[in-house]
Image (cartoon, helix red, strand yellow):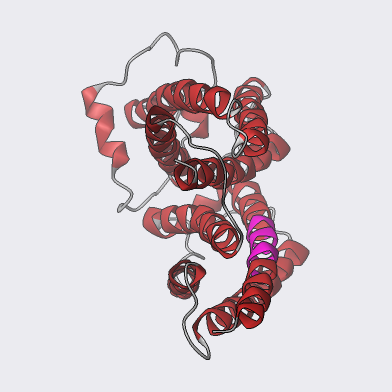
Amino acid sequence: MPTENRSARLQRIKILAQVLTALSLLILLVSAYIRLRGAGLGCGPWPDCYGQILTGTAQLHNGEARILHRGVASLTLVLGFALVWQCRRPQTIQPPAPYATALLVLMIVLTFVGLWSSDPHRAWAGFINILGGAGLVLLSWRTALAAGSAQGAASPRHLVGLLHAGLGLLALTIMLGALIGVRYAATACPSLPDCGGVLWPATSGLSALNPFTTIAVAVPMGDDGGVALHLLHRYCALVTLLLLGLGGLQALAQPATRQSAGLLLTLLLTQMALGVLTVLSGFSLRLAVAHSVCASALLAVGMQVLVRAKASA
């Protein structure tokens, strides 16, 4: 392929992927707003009305938000096909092609999962949607990075290891947060740093880790399963803060990763602050939505630091 044609295609792919990243973040924001508002966060009197969507009583629906969500999701799917076409025709262009293809597959999967998402009792559908939303941001941004250049001085191997471990813990933390949401377990632990005097999850509460269940009512305060999810989520978040914080500080010393590392550390501190403030505020809707969106942005930026560190290793 001529160099000029390749460069032009990579530039188009990069722009499309960046647009998809922005749209994916918007989908995440609107989806979190619809989901959490329907669950009853911020309703009055709080927390008596929490989980009202499960009982079939009056819900705080927002028609404009749902229309926006469906419209943006449809546009994203169309652009996903366009991105794959740019990566695969007239011939496959590497390295962005596999990431773009994975992104489109995820979009199609989430489209089918959406058929079951209207029923809040299906925890698995909400769980897949939440994780899938984070995956959309991650894969679209990974495609944009693959279409760009990644060059720099050598990075130490232990930095790559720290980032790998930190991102793995971050993914686990997001999964636990998703389980808290789909199980309507926010009120199980409305205090910090413990949960009503409990500092370690009971064995009986570990069954809450199973997302393939049917939810009948919101989890009450002190419930073993809800407490276990909250405590595991917090402990994983602390370890994530340690690992990504150390990795980010070390990445600041590397020219190839300095700018991304600064953004990573900023998002990391912001995310931790949002998590604490969400609990202390009595689970404010705005803070809960911001916490959800920031988690995916943090995952994408952490992956960017890792990609650039590996490219220069």
Judge left or right: residue 210 versus residue 84. Answer: left
At which x and y percent is residue 254?
58, 31
Judge left or right: residue 262 versus residue 183. Answer: right
Residue 97, magenta (yes or no)? no
**Quarter of image, res 267:** top right
Front residue of 285 and 141: 141
Front residue of 219 and 128: 128
Front residue of 213 and 109: 109
Judge left or right: residue 232 versus residue 210. Answer: right
Q: Is 162 located above or below residue 4 in the figure?
A: above
Q: Residue at x 45, y 12 (%)?
A: 196
Q: Residue furthest toward the left?
A: 203
At which x and y percent is residue 170?
45, 36
**Quarter of image, res 124:** bottom left
Residue 21, magenta (yes or no)? yes
Please identify the quadrant where the N terminus is shown: bottom right
SS assignment for the magenta stretch, majority? helix
Q: Is 197 located above or below residue 273 in the figure?
A: above
**Quarter of image, res 262:** top right
Q: Residue furthest toward the right?
A: 64
Q: Residue furthest toward the bottom?
A: 90
Q: Residue at x 52, y 29 (%)?
A: 187
Magenta residues (range): 16-26
Q: Residue at x 33, y 26 (%)?
A: 224
| Residue 41 in sight in this render | no
